[in-house]
Amino acid sequence: MNKNILKYIASIALFGLLFSCKKDETKVIMSTVNVPMIQTMPNLTLTRATGTQTLTFVGTPVDPGFQASATYFLEACVKGNNFADPISIYNGVSDASMQITVSDLNGILLKKLAADQVSAVDFRVRAVLTLSAGTGYTPMVYNSAISTVNVTTYGLPRLDLIGSGMTQKIESALGNGSYTGYVKLDATKPFTLKDPDAGTVYGNTGGALATNGASFTAAASGWYKVSANVTAHTYTIDPYMIGLVGDATPNGWNSPDQKLDYNAATGTWSITLGLIDGTFKFRKNDGWAWNLGYNSDSSSLVFNGSNVPATAGNYTITLTITNDALQTGTFKVVKN
């Protein structure tokens, strides 16, 4: 009887071992992943004369071996930086034709590269896949091989703000007499615009831009998008105040929102504040006509996207608006 019992136990153990090996063998079988690639790079000798031209970066899609949607990010960094501080150029659902104008790319790259010189720059495509795990999102990230090319950037003509209380400027991306930029204005400090090269000072005369015209005044203190055309003699001073709103923020879903500050050197908006458990979104001028929330893949921001979850703590939040008209962007949250 004891021998039979031992044989029975041994048979069960052997069956279990074989079954376990079979399961383990199944677990380690994985499909080959074809990572995205940058297939074609445009000529990146950027000039003011070609500022309106469209550049196209052509890539190949990620193939993880199963059906999944992806969001693609075209990123750059100074050669050898290993994308520790990447420059975001494009994000979208396809990398087959990633397009940007010469002037827009030049403006983005000037946040990290010196003007009027050749710089070695690394480019990559980052694909982010998100699979629902029932309780949230599990991102899967695949990076292309790095493509290193020489990039020539060009400096921008500018108009300096005189009297605004700080060193600020608006720039002409095409060098065609049309200037624009984000500036912080104080309603108690009138200002004029000065061309530092020609020494010409511009102001307002009868609602038009005019040499030696009266000073401009902001309706209220805050951030504005200021545009001036010295050829057409026109100007606009439009509120451009990016804020956080949501039940995780001090004012909840009510205005005024928690306003972010702009960093012209990096082209980013940021704020440091305390949050409570809840959610938030980004919006402009305390209204919903322009707002950013989570994309479905939880790695980028899109118009009317989902609320961004937050847990209680003090954070520095940095927003990069990748396309103002299409309302897309990316952001970082760092707990202090």
Image (cartoon, rainbow, N blue to C red):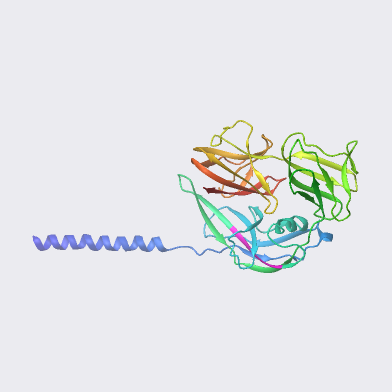
**Residue 75: % across, % down:** 64, 59
Q: Vertical placement of 41 versus 216: above or below?
A: below
Which sits in the foreground, 240 or 67?
240
Which sits in the foreground, 169 or 287?
169
Which range of residues does the magenta coloring cover? 119-126
Identify the image quadrant of residue 250.
top right
- Residue at image position (57%, 62%) is 143
Which sits in the foreground, 189 or 85?
189
Identify the image quadrant of residue 183.
top right
The stretch drawn in magenta includes residue 124: yes
**Residue 120: % across, % down:** 68, 68
- Residue at image position (87%, 51%) is 177
- Residue at image position (75%, 48%) is 168
Tell how many labels: 0
Which residue is situated farthest in the top direction here? 254
The stretch drawn in magenta includes residue 203: no
**Residue 12: % across, % down:** 22, 59
Horizontal side of 311 relative to 302 (left or right) equals left
**Residue 285: % across, % down:** 69, 36
Assign the magenta stretch its main secondary structure: strand
Q: Quadrant of the N terminus?
A: bottom left
